[in-house]
Image (tube, grey):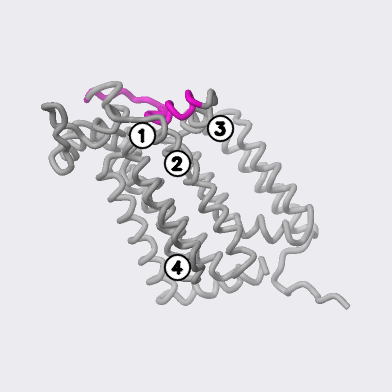
Amino acid sequence: MTNAAPTNSVTINTKSVLTVTLLSIAYLVVSYLLLGFKSDGLVLVGLFNLMFYASVITRKFILGFTVFVVYWIIFDYMKAIPNYNFNQVHIADLYNFEKHLFGIHYKGQLLTPNEYWRANSTTFIDIMAGIFYLCWIPVPLGFAAFMFFKNRRQFLYFSLTFLLVNLLGFVIYYAFPAAPPWYVQLYGFDFHPLKMGNTGGLARFDAYFNVGVFKSIYTKGSNVFAAMPSLHSAYPVIVFYYAVKNRLGWVNAIFAIVILGIWFTAVYASHHYVLDVLAGLTTAILGISLFNLLIAKWKWLQRFITKYEQVIT
């Protein structure tokens, strides 16, 4: 005898089909109006609908991962509203402050850490750096998938914390637009309203393996002037926090290594200053702390998470 589905779980009926269909159409229309035609949007809608209708478990899975879908949509839509339209982009001041705090004396010159590593790069470090930087999205998503099957409540805590940290980061992007180190290397201190990112030092990884992995990633970037905080540096911190919280044992050591690898690569590949990395760490700590405070104080948030958990369980 099979167990009945939980009362609050989403079933396939007229209401759910209509809701998913209307949301899918609305997303495609808004995306087209803001960004023009993009195949990524069709892939996202197709994948969501496929998983929603395929089976009960895939439906629960994709509904759980809706938090990450929301993150992606907001991130993508930032292309339509560049942050440099709202505030002055920080270029020279950030570069000079980085050099003042973390400058390295090398061959009679004072260099930023980015400049030092650019002059002292090696093929081995290029390869390891590329591997670490490829972890910045797969690791959080893989960890989320693991937590989905291990503990739905902790999965939701992790997902919502991830979203909150990103929202904090996005606010800072618009309040404090910041050019990455590679921008200074290519354009100096003059402002040019670029809309396409650059692979920076990661180009050496692509060149060594004769691939366009990072080139394809950075041509889709939402904002060139969003170096501070480094959310690349924040993501593995969130993963590490929830891994420790859920007592994953030796796996925590792997996540700690990933953190250090991504932090180093962010600077080594000239995508972020040390200041950006520290800001990313601070944003992660602030987001984690704020979420824990909200979940303890806001009863409506507790009720929302409980209902959400029932839907995906």
**Is 292 located above or below residue 87 in the figure?**
below
220 falls in the magenta region: no
Q: What residue type is labelled 2?
A: Tyr
**How far is the residue under mark 3 from the one under mark 2?**
32 Å
> Mark 1 or mark 2, which has the lower sequence index?
2
Point out the frontmost of discs 3 and 1.
1
Q: Residues within 10 Å of mark 1 (few under 14, many from 20)?
A: many
CB-based contact (under 8 Å), mark 1 and mark 2: yes
**Is 91 located above or below residue 176 in the figure?**
above
| Residue range corresponding to the magenta coloring | 189-208
Give residue 194's position: percent from left, percent from top.
Answer: 37, 25
> Mark 4 or mark 3, which has the lower sequence index?
3
**Is 196 located above or below residue 312 in the figure?**
above
Identify the residue under disc 4. Answer: 244
**How far is the residue under mark 4 from the one under mark 2?**
22 Å
CB-based contact (under 8 Å), mark 4 and mark 1: no
Q: Which residue occupies the extreme right position in the image? A: 1
**How far is the residue under mark 4 from the one under mark 3?**
43 Å
Identify the residue under disc 3. Answer: 33
> Mark 4 or mark 2, which has the lower sequence index?
2
Is 111 situated left or right of 278 in this image?
A: left
Q: Residues within 10 Å of mark 2 (few under 14, many from 20)?
A: many
**At 55% from the left edge and 57% from the top edge, which residue is drawn?**
143
**At 53% from the left edge and 45% from the top edge, which residue is drawn?**
72
Give residue 119's position: percent from left, percent from top.
Answer: 27, 27
> Mark 3 or mark 1, which has the lower sequence index?
3
Q: Which amino acid does label 4 sit on?
A: Val
**At 56% from the left edge and 65% from the top edge, which residue is drawn?**
155
Q: Which amino acid does label 1 sit on?
A: Ala
* Foreground of the two, 126 or 56: 126
